[in-house]
Amino acid sequence: MALTIQSFSGGDVAAFVDDLARLRITVFRDFPYLYDGDLAYERNYLATYSRSEGSVFVLAIDDGQVVGAATGTPMVGETDEVKAPFLAAGRDPAEHFYFGESVLLSDYRGRGIGVKFFEGREAQAKKLGLRYTTFCAVERAADHPRRPADYVPLDSFWTKRGYTHHPELRTTFSWRDLDEAEESPKPLSFWIRDLRS
């Protein structure tokens, strides 16, 4: 069975929630996220997305196994942490489609799947008549002790996809790093693409 990229909306993704939860935990353990995941939290997080009006899940499936996933939803349904920087800058969340994450097992990277993830979510944003797509990325210090020597940020990939970094749009999310006893706030900044340009 060949690798396929499929898009699902809302409750249609229910059969894959546990696979997606495990995938997020696996991929987000790596730098720069260093996330010490919890299956119950992940299920709840993904259920929120599946109930969101206009959301999309773009899945990479190989022989029945989910090996990658990307999510997106209209920003109006997102949390205050996501919307607040936009409201403060005078940008209307109702014009934006927010990308929740893009996770892919390392063996499948470099095959163009990441591009398909962006195309699938951008197609959903256009279908909904939204002008902008956006996501945020965690910021880690260049001398972070867990930064791999061969780590390459995804900035150039995002730029090639038409995204512009907006460091003035900042937020914080809290999670527990692998070496932390409890959650701590992490800084993130946003990238935006105008789908009409």
Image (cartoon, rainbow, N blue to C red):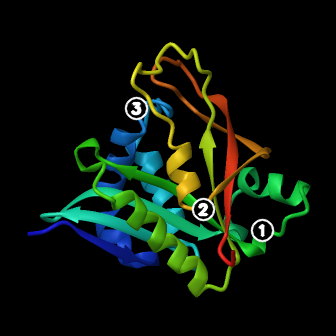
Which tag, 2 or 3, sits closer to the chain's start? 3
As drawn, the label of residue 162 is 2
Q: Position of residue 184 (x, y in %)?
A: 64, 27
State left or right for residue 169 relative to residue 152: right
Write the residue at 60% across / 27% down: 140
Q: Nearer the viewer, residue 70 or 159?
A: 159
Residue 77's quadrant in the figure? bottom right
Q: Nearer the viewer, residue 95 or 78?
A: 95
Q: Nearer the viewer, mark 1 or mark 2?
A: 2
**Cα distance, mark 2 to mark 3?**
26 Å
Q: Amino acid at mark 2?
A: Gly
Dot 2: few (<14), some (14–19), or many (≥20) neighbours within 10 Å?
some
Q: Residue at x 45, y 73 (%)?
A: 120
Q: Earlier in the sequence, mark 3 or mark 1?
A: 3
Query: Horizontal placement of 56 versus 1: left or right?
Result: right
**Crowdedness near tag 1: few (<14), some (14–19) or many (≥20) residues, C-alpha within 10 Å:** many
**To which residue does mark 3 refer?**
30
User: What residue type is disc 3 on?
Assistant: Asp
User: Does 129 sit above or below residue 43?
Assistant: below
Q: Tell me the SS state at disc 3.
A: loop
Which residue in the protein does label 1 denote?
A: 93
Q: Callout 2: helix, strand or loop?
A: loop
Q: Find the distance from the CA under tag 1 to the CA under tag 2.
A: 19 Å
State the image coordinates of residue 81 (x, y, percent, origin top left).
74, 50
Please name the residue shown 51% across and 79% down the image: 123
**The quarter of the displayed image where residue 93 is located:** bottom right
| Relative to 4, 93 lies left or right | right
| Image quadrant in which the C terminus is located | bottom right
Residue 23 in the image: x percent, y percent?
A: 33, 48
| Residue at screen point 70% across, 57% down | 79
Which label's residue is closer to the chain start, 1 or 2?
1
The three-letter code of the residue at mark 1 reads Pro
